[in-house]
């Protein structure tokens, strides 16, 4: 796909994608993160937005073309030194962190449910204390995907040690936010009176 089009999913130009990324980042419970992990980075549109909130991002993709496009985007933006790009897939062992943010955007439904469960059970315990996990997935059925986005997010939500912080859901996308500590709401964490 990447040999035929620079941005095969139209991640940079399609309003649906721009809006989804804005909602995804708006749902994050902290203004700043030290080190994010983003498997399935594609051409780096979300990676670039994550750098506005993260000191460093480690992004992976199985496609060399996608990684080349992300590299070019980060180089042009002058942020390449803040991004680690690795070839790999979600089901492989995750890179060493520690990560305090994991962004699972449009990737989990590519795995069989049992494999996603196995990956999460292996990797979530390795996350930094007080890590945030955000999961954004397409809700419509796609014949080539082993499951729909709702099912993927349900599996993530059932991971031992994760606590649900919030959700956005419309006809097209579901975005859930979790952390591994639980506790007070965003308002309470930031001392908003009455929370």
Image (cartoon, rainbow, N blue to C red):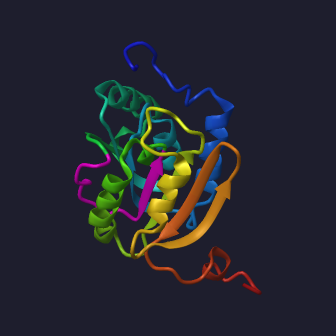
Left or right, 190 with reference to 124: right
Which residue is found at the position 47% from the left and 53% from the top? 152
Q: Check the image and name the residue furthest to the top.
A: 4
Quarter of the figure with the N terminus? top left
Res 129 visible: yes
Q: Check the image and name the residue furthest to the bottom.
A: 194
Res 57 visible: no
Labels in figure, total: 0
The residue nearer to you, when weighing 26 against 82, is 26
Q: Check the image and name the residue furthest to the right.
A: 194
Q: Return the x and y of residue 114 as percentages of the image width and height.
A: 33, 56
User: Residue 65 is drawn in which quadrant?
Assistant: top left
User: Residue 175 is drawn in which quadrant?
Assistant: bottom right
Which residue is found at the position 66% from the left and 42% from the top? 172
Q: Return the x and y of residue 143 as percentages of the image width and height.
A: 48, 32
Magenta stretch mostly in which secondary structure?
A: loop
Which residue is found at the position 53% from the left and 44% from the top? 49
The residue nearer to you, when weighing 110 against 61, is 110
Quarter of the figure with the C terminus? bottom right
In magenta, the rendered stretch is 90-105
**Magenta highlight on residue 100:** yes
**Magenta highlight on residue 56:** no
Q: Return the x and y of residue 24 as percentages of the image width and height.
A: 59, 52
Q: Return the x and y of residue 167 as percentages of the image width and height.
A: 63, 62
Left or right, 113 with reference to 170: left
From this view, report whether residue 121 is shown above or below residue 102: below
User: Residue 141 is drawn in which quadrant?
Assistant: top right
């Amino acid at each position: 796909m990447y040999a035929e089009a620079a941005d095969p999913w139209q991640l940079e130009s399609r309003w649906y994608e721009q809006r989804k990324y804005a909602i995804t980042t708006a749902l994050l419970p902290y203004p700043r993160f030290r080190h994010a992990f983003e498997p399935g980075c594609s051409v780096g549109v979300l990676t670039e937005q994550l750098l506005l909130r993260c000191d460093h991002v480690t992004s992976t993709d199985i496609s060399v073309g996608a990684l080349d496009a992300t590299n070019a985007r980060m180089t042009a933006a002058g942020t390449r030194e803040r991004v680690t790009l690795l070839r790999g897939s979600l089901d492989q062992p995750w890179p060493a962190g520690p990560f305090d943010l994991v962004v699972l955007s449009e990737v989990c439904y590519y795995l069989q449910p049992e494999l996603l469960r196995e990956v999460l059970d292996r990797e979530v315990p390795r996350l930094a204390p007080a890590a945030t996990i955000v999961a954004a997935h397409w809700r419509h059925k796609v014949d080539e995907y082993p499951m729909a986005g709702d099912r993927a997010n349900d599996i993530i939500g059932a991971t031992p040690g994760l606590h649900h912080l919030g959700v956005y859901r419309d006809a097209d996308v579901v975005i859930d936010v979790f952390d591994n500590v639980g506790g007070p709401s965003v308002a309470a964490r930031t001392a908003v009176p009455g929370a």
